[in-house]
Image: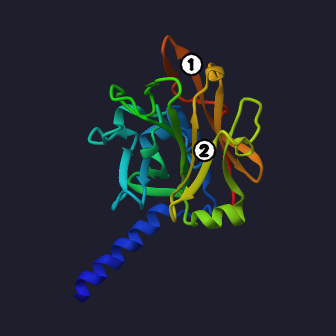
């Protein structure tokens, strides 16, 4: 039993050394699902491609560190390897981001098998919107179109997959994060009685805010936006636009409204 505990402790020490560099501050990148994102490797050496290894870890869905790229070579046994690429400056590109991509990314440099410098860490947070009733013919939630009949109720769920060691309550009270549903002019839809807005959160990794309403004839071309703010500054946003086509209503796929925002906090 003691040997087993020693092995567990050793595993935790290795994991901690992998994910915790000495730079002290992570980069935090916010992106909407369906967009492309570039994660910077701030510790890159010259001619870095053959020296760079990228790791991924998500304590909420993975029990072990995943090696995405080893010394510049893509790991082909990774399910999402076709969406990943390594740039000449050793930044990591992720195409068509999904909510499953959120987590902690670590860039490490090696020379002759020896680790060089400090690790560059990036925490990726993903804003994702889904709609119900869902389309049975859609291939994925991030690229689906949902057809419903006019007059029916529709619910849009906006979810922030947030990777951090703080609880959601702490992030709201101390860090000032907020999710809002707004109209085309930026007015908070909580002020309009025709919309039901509900907020909830899991303990550590995400917020959810839902919008429920019954579609009206005048909703054709109406836009609703879910936006993430940090201390009243917009970080990223996703919009849904209602389009009437014949006797059916089509909710268009989400679009990122703002550019990717990167910031640092202690």
The image quadrant of residue 59 is: bottom left
Would you name the residue on which mark 1 appears? 243
Look at 36% across and 31% down and name the residue there. 82
Q: Residue furthest top?
A: 246
Relative depth, front residue between 40 and 202 = 202
Look at 33% across and 62% down and name the residue there. 63
Placement of 106 over or under 174, stated as above or below: above
The image quadrant of residue 235 is: top right
Would you name the residue on which mark 2 appears? 30
Relative depth, front residue between 157 and 194 = 194
Dot placed on the residue nearer the N-terminal end, 2 or 1? 2
Residue 186 position in % (x across, y down): 76, 35
Relative depth, front residue between 121 and 228 = 228
Asked if residue 90 shows in the view, the reply is no
Residue 58 numbered mark, or none? none
Look at 31% across and 77% down and name the residue there. 8
Residue 97 position in % (x across, y down): 47, 36
Placement of 89 over or under 146, stated as above or below: below
Residue 66 position in % (x across, y down): 35, 52
Asked if residue 241 shows in the view, the reply is yes
Relative depth, front residue between 51 and 39 = 39
């Amino acid at each position: 039993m003691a040997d087993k505990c020693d092995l567990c402790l050793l595993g935790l020490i290795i994991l901690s050394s992998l994910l915790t560099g000495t730079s002290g501050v992570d980069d935090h990148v916010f992106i909407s699902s369906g967009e492309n994102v570039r994660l910077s490797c701030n510790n890159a050496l010259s001619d870095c491609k053959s020296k760079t290894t990228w790791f991924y870890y998500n304590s909420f869905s993975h029990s072990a560190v995943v090696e995405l790229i080893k010394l510049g070579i893509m790991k082909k046994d990774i399910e999402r390897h076709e969406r990943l690429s390594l740039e000449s400056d050793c930044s990591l590109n992720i195409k068509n981001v999904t909510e499953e991509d959120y987590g902690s990314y670590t860039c490490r440099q090696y020379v002759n098998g020896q680790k060089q410098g400090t690790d560059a860490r990036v925490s990726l947070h993903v804003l994702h919107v889904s709609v119900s009733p869902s389309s049975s013919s859609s291939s994925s939630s991030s690229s689906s179109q949902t057809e419903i009949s006019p007059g029916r109720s529709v619910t849009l769920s906006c979810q922030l997959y947030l990777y951090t060691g703080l609880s959601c309550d702490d992030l709201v009270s101390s860090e000032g994060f907020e999710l809002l549903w707004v109209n085309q002019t930026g007015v908070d839809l909580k002020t309009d009685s025709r919309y039901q807005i509900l907020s909830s959160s899991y303990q550590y990794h995400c917020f959810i805010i839902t919008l429920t309403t019954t579609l009206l004839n005048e909703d054709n071309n109406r836009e609703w936006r879910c936006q993430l703010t940090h201390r009243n500054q917009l970080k990223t946003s996703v919009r849904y636009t209602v389009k009437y086509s014949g006797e059916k209503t089509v909710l268009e796929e989400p679009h990122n409204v703002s550019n990717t925002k990167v910031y640092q906090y202690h």
